[in-house]
Amino acid sequence: MLVRYVARRFLASLVVVLGVTLITLILMDRTRGTYVPGIDLNPALRPEDIEHLRENLGLDRPFYVWYLTWLGSVLHGDFGHSMIDGSPVLSHILDRLPNTLELTATAIVIGVLVAVPLGVIGALRRGSKTDHALTVTSVAGFAVPQFWMGLMLILIFSVTLEQNGLPWLPSSGAYSAFNGGDFLDRVEHLILPATVLSFFYTSQWSRFIRSSMLEVLSQDYIRTARAKGMSERRVVYLHGLRNALIPLITLIGLELPGLVSGGLVVEVVFGWPGIGKLAFERALQYDYTTVMGVTFFATLLVIAGNLLADLLYGALDPRIRYG
Amino acid sequence: MIGPSRVAELDMPAAGVETAAARPAQSYWNQSWERLRANRLGMAAGVLILVLAVIAVLAPVFSAVLTHYQPQTINLDQTFARPGATHLLGSDELGRDSLTRLIWGARVSLGVAFLTVALALTVGTTVGMVAGYYGGWIDDVLMRLVDTVLAIPAIFLFILMSILFRPNAVTLAAIVASVGWGSVARLVRGEVLSVKQRDFILATRSIGARDSRLMVRHLLPNVLPVLIVAASLGVGQIILIEAALDFLGLGIQPPTPSWGNMLTNAQSYFFHSGFLVAFPGITIFVTVLASNIFGNGVRDAFDPRLKG
Amino acid sequence: MSRDEDHKDDGFAQFEQFLEEWSRRDFLKRTGGAAAYLSFIGGGLAAFLEACAGGTSNNTPTAKKGGHVVEGNFSDIRTLNSMLSSDTASNQVIGLMFDGLLNYKKDGSLVAALAQDLPKTNSDGTVYTFKLRSGLKWSDGQPLTSDDVKFTYQLAYDPQYKDVTSPRRGDLSKYIKSIDTPDPQTVVITTTQVFAPFLSSHGRYGILPKHVLGSLDGKAINTAPFNTAPNVTCGAFKFVKWDKGQQVTMERNDNFWAGPPNLDQWIYKVLPDSVAVTNQLKTGEIDIGPVDPSHFDAVKSADNVAVTEFPVPTFTFYAYQLDAAKKGGKLFSDKAVRQALLFALNRDQVVSAVYFGHGSVANSVEPPISWAYKDKPQVLYSFDKAKAESMLESAGWTKGSDGIRAKNGLKLKFDMITNAGNKQRESMLQVMQQSWKDIGVDATPSLIQFPQLVSQITNIRTFDMFLVGFNFDEDPDQGQLWHSRNTVAGGFNGFDFKNSDVDSLLDQAVGTLDKTKRKQLYGQFQDIMSDVVPAPIILFNHGIWGVSKRVQGADFGPFNQFATRPWNHNVWVTDGK
C-alpha cells in the first residue's frame, strides 16, 4: 500500500519537475529575440556578433527544441554551461549548494535551541503574563523583514563593535578573504546570517511546542506519574518534554522543501555564496542554463521534502488515510 | 523565509472534534468567540489591523487634512528633515514627507496583503473542498496540481514573474496568491477529510442533500476557523514577502510608496537619517506582529484542546 | 587583544626596523629622536618623512615587502580571458593579472607596459611598430614574445578564430588589416585606415599566452578552463583560485616585467551592495573599495580609511526619442522642446541632492577632464524655468485646462525609463518628473530591469525617453553614441539621432592623428551638440575610492580606477601583513 503510494508520487513528481522547469523556461524566454544573455551595454558589439552569440547559445531555435535538447543532456548528467560566464552549471551548483545547506541547517539548530525553552516555559506558565510575553517575543523576531534585521545586526555586531575595539563579527561571505576558511572562521561568518534565518523557525516552533507540551501534559500517563509521586521536574522533562518533542521531528521535516530557497534574502544581504543568491543573480541576467539547473535541483528537493512531510503527517494524524 | 508555512496544518485541529456531533455548531462558535474576546492582547491586535486598514482606505483624506502633502511631491531643499513641525515624521532623500508616504504606503502594502489573502483563500478553499469532498480521482488530480504549485520554489517564481511582469499592486497580489493557494487547499482538504466521516454529514447526504449545499452550509462553517487563522497570519506574511521582493528590486517600484520599498530605500541612506529606516521598520513590525498575535489568538480560541 | 593594541606594538617594531634601514646618525641629526618617533607612530611612514627636515629631496618611502590587500566590489567576475570579457568586474581582475602593450596614466595619457616605449607610427598613421621590452617572461618562465601579442589580437580579428565570441571583434576586425612579427621583440600592427583612437582604445588588452591557448580552435577557446583558472599570467599577479560568488585570490608574480610586486597577495572580494563596502571599509574587512556618493561622509569619518575623489569620464544622460514615427519622436523632434526641458532642470540641485555634491554639471558632451573639452560651447544651459516656459509657449505648446501643455491636440506627456536598483537614477527620474510638472509637462517615471533596458535601447526602441549612465575611454571620440551608423539594430544610438554635420565631424576627427586639428573638430562638434541636444548629459560623475590607511601606493585617478592601473605592483601595506 505504502509502496504503491510512494511510487505513484514519484511518477507524479517527474511530471512536476518537467512542469516547473518548462514554466521557468517559458517565463525567461519572453525576452527571446531582443536580449542575448551576457551582453551588457556594449556598443562595440555589432548585430552580427550578437547573432553569432545567439546561435552559440542555441537561442535561435524555438524554445521547445531548446528545452528538449536541454532535457536530453540533463538525463546524461550534463547541465550545460552558464550563458554568462561559460562555467559548467553543475560546478556552480555543487560549489554553492553545501553553503546553503550549511546555513539553513545551522539556522534550524539555532531555531530548535531557542524554540524549545520558549515553548516549554510558555506551556508551564500558560495564560500568565510570562506566557504572553514569550508569545510576543517568539513572533517578534520574525515580524521584521529579514533584510532589515540583517542590516541592523551588521551595524551592531559588526561595525559598532569593531569601531569600539570589541570583538566583532564579520558582515559578509562564508569565510575571511585572507587566510580564511578554517572551522572557527567559518563559524564566525555563520553566526549573523544563521541567526537572522533562525527567527523564522523559532517563531513557528515555539508556538507548536507550547501547544504540543500542553497536550502531552494533559494526558493520563502524566497524571499517573504525578500520582505516583514523581517529582514535578521529572514529570515535565522526562515524560512530558520527550513526548512533546516527537512531532518536532515532523516539523523539521516540513522545512525540507524550503531549505534551498528559504535563505535567499539572507544570502543576498550577507553575500552568502549559496544557491539562492546564485539563482537570483542569474535570473536577473537571463542566464537560462544556470537558472534551469538550479530550478531543477530545487524542485527535486522540494518534492522530496513534500513527500517526506506527507508521510510523516500521515503517520502523525491517523484520520488521514492514503489509498 | 518566503513561502507558505505548513505548521499551520499540523497545529490546527479539526474544529470541535469531539463535540460537534453532540452539540449543534452555534454554541461552539459562541464559546470560541467568548474565548477570543477574553484574550485582550489578541483583540487589541485585531483592532489595530482594522484601524490601519481604515487609514489606508482614507489615505487621500489624511493627506489633505493631516499632513497637507502628496506622497510623490519632492522638495530638494528639505531633504532628510528631522521629525518636526514641517514634516511630522521627517522627510526622505528627495524631501518627500515620510508620514504621508507611510499612510499611502499602507494602501499598497495592506492592499496587496488583503487582496492576496482573498485570492488565495477563494481559490484554495474551492479546490480543497472539492478535492476533500469527492475524493477519488478528482482528489488525485487536484492534489497533483497542488503539488506542482507547491513544488515550485516560491521565491524563484516570484523573481521570474517580477522580472517579466512589472508588478503593480494587483499583479503582485496575483503572483503571490498563485503560489499561496496551494497550501490553503491542502489545509482545507485536511479539514474536510476529517469532518467528512462524521455522522451528521453522512446523515445529510443520505437524505439526498445536494453536494454544493452540503459543502457551503455544513462543511464551510467547520472550515472557517482554519481560514480565519490562515488569513490573519497570511496578511503579516505577505507584508514581509512584499518587503523582501522590494529589497530584491522586484516588488512595487518607486516612486509609488509601499512600506517595503520605503524601508529598502532607507537602508542606503542610513548614514544620513536613522528615522528613514526606523519608521517604516516599526510600522511593518507592529502590523506583522499584530497579524501574528491575532491569528494565534483565533487559533487558541477555536482550539478545544486548551480548555479554560 | 583589540586591533588598536596590535597596531601600537607593531608600530614600535616598525620603527626599530626603519631605524635599521636608515643611518641612525642621519635621521637623528635632522630631528629629536622622541619627536621623530611620535610623528612616525602618529602618521605612518609617509607623514613622518614629510615631517622630517625638508632638506632631503626625493626620498621615497621604502615600501615594505609582503602582506595582502583585499579589494571589494559588487559583482563577481565572469571570465578571466581578456579577449572575452565585457563586464567591469572581469576587466578589473584581468587588469591585475594581465598587462597589455600599453596602459593609462592617471590622466589618460598612454604609458608603455609590455612595450618598451610608445610605438612608432609611420607617416600616414596606419602602421604602429611596437618594440617589446627585453627579457619578458610569463609567470611560468616562458618568454613572452611578439607571437603572443599577435595571437591575442587574432582571436578577435582573424577569420581563423571567428568562432571565438569576442566582444572586441566588431572594432578589431574593422580596423586591423594585419599584424606582423618580424622578430620576437617586434610587433607591427597595420590598420585599415587612420583611426586616431586605435592605440588608446585597443592598445591595452591583456596579452594571452599562445603556448597555453594556441593549440585550441575557436570554439574550444570559448570554454577553455584557462578562462576561469588562468594558470599562466603576465601581469603583476598570478591566479591562485576563484571561489565562485565570493572572491578571486591572486598572488605575486615574480616574473613581472617591472619587478615582483611588493604584496604577496591581492584578493578581489565580492560584496552585496554599497552599504557593505562602507561597513567593511570601516571594519577593515576590505582595504580598498569604491564609495557611493551617499556614503562619502560616513567613510570619511572613519579614522582608518582615506577617501580620494576625482572627476571621471563617467556620466549620466537622458535621451529623447527622435524617431518621428514613434510617439516620443512626435514630441521631441522639435528642438525647442528639447532645449526647454533641459532649461527646466535644476541640474546643480540634482548634483547636490542626488549625488551629495560629488559630481559636476555637464556643460558639454565631452568630460571636463578630456583634452578636447570645450568649456563654453555654443549653448549653455543654466536652470531657467521662465525661459523654458516661454520657449514652449513660443513653440506652440500651450497649457490646457488640466495644466498640461499641448500642441495641435498632442499632449506633452511621455514615459521615462531607467533600470531598477540604481538609487541615483531612480531619484533623478523623480526630480525630472517634478521639474517638468512645474512647467506643464507630464512625465511618468518607470523602472525596468537592466537587461530589458538594454533591449529597449539597442533593439525594441519603443521608449519615449530613457536615462542611463555611460563612460568613454580616454579618446574623445564619441561615435558610438552619436554617429548615425549606430542607429541600426544592436547599435547604441537607439534614439535615432542622425545629423550629417556631426557624422562628418566625428569621421574627420578619427581620421587624423593631428591633435590640434582634432581638438578644433571636437570643438565644433561640441558646439553643434549643445545646440541640438539629442541626449542631454546631466552630470559627469566623480570617482570616489576608500583606501585603508595601511595601504600605500594606490594612486587612483580619472583613468586609473578599475581595470587600468599601472601601479598595482607598487602597492604595499604598512603592517606587512
Image (spheres, coloured by chain):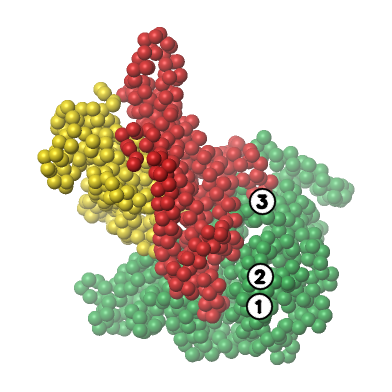
Chain colours: A red, B yellow, C green
| Residue identified by numbered label 2 | C221
Any part of residue B282 in sight:
no
Q: Answer yes or no: do the residues labelled 2 and 3 have beta carbons within 8 Å?
A: no
Q: Mark 2 touching mark 1, by CB under 8 A? A: yes
In the image: residue B59, left or right of residue B160: left
Mark 3 belongs to which subunit? C
Q: Tell me where residue C87 appears, x and y as whole percent.
A: 58, 66
Circle nearer the viewer, 2 or 3: 2
The residue indicated by pointer 1 is C161
SS under mark 1: helix
Q: CA distance from mark 3 to mark 1?
A: 46 Å
Q: Tell me if mark 2 has few (under 14), some (14-19) or many (20+) residues whose alpha carbon lies within 10 angstroms of its own.
A: many
**First along the sequence among labels 2 and 3:** 2
Q: Quick check: can you spot residue B10?
A: yes
Check residue C549 in the rendering and tell me which mark sits there, or answer none.
Answer: 3
On the same chain, marks 2 and 1? The answer is yes
Compare residues C337 and B178 and report the one nearer the observer: B178
At label 1, which amino acid type do we have? Tyr
On the picture, is C348 further left or further right than C58?
A: left
Depth check: give the residue in front, B206 or C221.
Answer: B206
**Disc 3 residue type?**
Lys
Q: Are marks 2 and 3 on the same chain?
A: yes
